[in-house]
């Protein structure tokens, strides 16, 4: 059979038929198989795959991006700026999946304080409590709490089958309480503001000093930024009879003021929408009037470290 006839039957060119015949004569049937076609090399090499994998394990902020979570778009930008590689969204998504990643909702991880620091703090607070009981110092636990306009919900007594409702709306306003409590005498102090700023912390310390003008005062407080501000440090340094005892990080249970906040949250913002910050603040003042008239109640709320 002529080459031209074969070409017409299989619908290829004469040259293709001729090449196939030559390969058959030289290599037999194996010569008719096409050689592997290498194709275009992949843009994402093994090294880049490892790079993507290691970066997805950490926050983008570690690498200088002002974002807390990786997105496909951010990874595309990262690949372009670091490797000059342009990939489409679907390609990047496919590589995320090939590396074993998928969209997963995270959960909170409660940070815990250093156990050694906690034990040392408990020992120091015990010593301070003894000094306070003997009248050597005035001990005050200081902290801040934020009560928002949006009411919080809790169980209420209601008729069976009914569905109690609490009105609310999108109101971002809030009232911040800066409070301080003496766990020995049950005396409690407070100051209200719109935010937990360094100015609010300083104003509260000045308020304490005005109330106890000559006392040797030790303030136990956490490591909030407002408590470590320059204006607070300068004020305490000038006041030779006021000292700050800072608690370890992530150890809120060491601050006795937490019992007061728990009492307030049950009493004030639950199941009620206030007309505005003024009415919310007045309710807080009413709560403090009660506590200031019942120091034994304050002592039971603050407990002991």
Image (tube, rainbow, N blue to C red):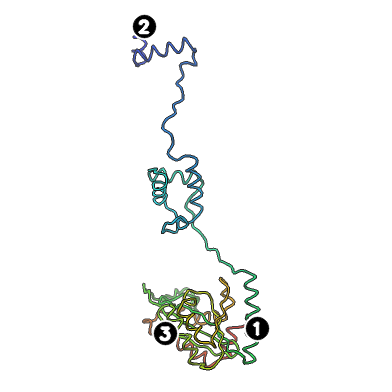
Q: Quadrant of the C terminus?
A: bottom right
Q: Earlier in the sequence, mark 3 or mark 1?
A: 1
Determine whether label 3 and label 1 are within 8 Å by CB: no
Determine whether label 1 and label 2 are within 8 Å by CB: no
**Residue 262 drawn at (x, y percent):** 53, 79
42 relative to 189, above or below:
above
**Residue placed most toward the observer, 158 or 226:** 226
Q: Which residue is mark 3?
A: 281
- Work out how far the residue at label 2 is from the one at label 3, CA to CA, in angstroms: 103 Å
User: Which type of secondary structure does the marked residue at label 3 adopt?
Assistant: helix
- Work out how far the residue at label 1 is from the one at label 2, CA to CA, in angstroms: 110 Å
Q: Earlier in the sequence, mark 1 or mark 2?
A: 2
**Residue 108 drawn at (x, y percent):** 52, 63
**Residue 292 drawn at (x, y percent):** 52, 91
* Location of residue 109 by image quarter: bottom right
Q: Residues within 10 Å of mark 3 (few under 14, many from 20)?
A: many
Q: Of the numbered discs in the image, which one, if any, rests on residue 2?
A: 2
Q: Residues within 10 Å of mark 1 (few under 14, many from 20)?
A: few
Q: Which residue is mark 1?
A: 127
Q: Earlier in the sequence, mark 2 or mark 3?
A: 2
**Residue placed most toward the observer, 241 or 76:** 241
**Residue placed most toward the observer, 206 or 262:** 206
User: Which type of secondary structure does the marked residue at label 1 adopt?
Assistant: helix
* Location of residue 131 by image quarter: bottom right
User: Which type of secondary structure does the marked residue at label 2 adopt?
Assistant: loop
Going 44% across and 73% down the picture, which residue do you hit? 163
Please identify, in this view, whether the residue under mark 1 or under mark 2 is nearer the observer: 1
**Residue placed most toward the observer, 119 or 192:** 119
Going 56% across and 66% down the picture, which residue do you hit? 111
Q: Quadrant of the N terminus?
A: top left
72 relative to 148, above or below:
above
């Amino acid at each position: 059979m002529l080459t031209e006839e074969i070409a017409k039957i299989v619908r290829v060119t004469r040259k293709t038929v001729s090449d196939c015949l030559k390969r058959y004569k030289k290599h037999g049937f194996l010569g008719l198989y096409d050689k592997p076609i290498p194709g275009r090399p992949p843009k994402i090499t093994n090294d880049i795959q490892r790079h993507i994998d290691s970066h997805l394990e950490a926050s983008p902020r570690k690498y200088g991006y002002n974002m807390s979570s990786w997105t496909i778009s951010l990874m595309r930008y990262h690949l372009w700026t670091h490797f000059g590689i342009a990939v489409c969204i679907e390609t990047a998504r496919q590589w995320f999946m090939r590396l074993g990643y998928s969209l997963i909702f995270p959960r909170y991880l409660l940070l815990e304080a250093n156990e050694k620091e906690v034990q040392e703090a408990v020992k120091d607070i015990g010593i301070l409590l003894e000094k306070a009981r003997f009248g050597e110092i005035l001990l005050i636990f200081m902290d801040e709490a934020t009560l928002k306009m949006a009411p919080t919900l809790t169980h209420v007594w209601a008729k069976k089958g009914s569905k109690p409702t609490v009105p609310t709306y999108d109101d971002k306003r809030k009232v911040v309480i800066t409070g301080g409590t003496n766990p020995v005498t049950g005396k409690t102090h407070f100051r209200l503001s719109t935010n937990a700023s360094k100015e609010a912390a300083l104003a509260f310390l000045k308020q304490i000093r005005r109330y106890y003008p000559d006392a040797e005062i030790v303030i136990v407080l956490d490591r909030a930024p407002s408590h470590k501000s320059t204006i607070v440090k300068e004020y305490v340094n000038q006041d030779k009879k006021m000292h700050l005892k800072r608690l370890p990080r992530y150890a809120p249970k060491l601050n006795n003021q937490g019992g007061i906040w728990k009492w307030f949250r049950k009493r004030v913002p639950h199941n009620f929408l206030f007309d505005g910050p003024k009415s919310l603040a007045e309710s807080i003042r009413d709560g403090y009037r009660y506590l200031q008239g019942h120091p034994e109640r304050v002592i039971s709320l603050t407990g002991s470290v």
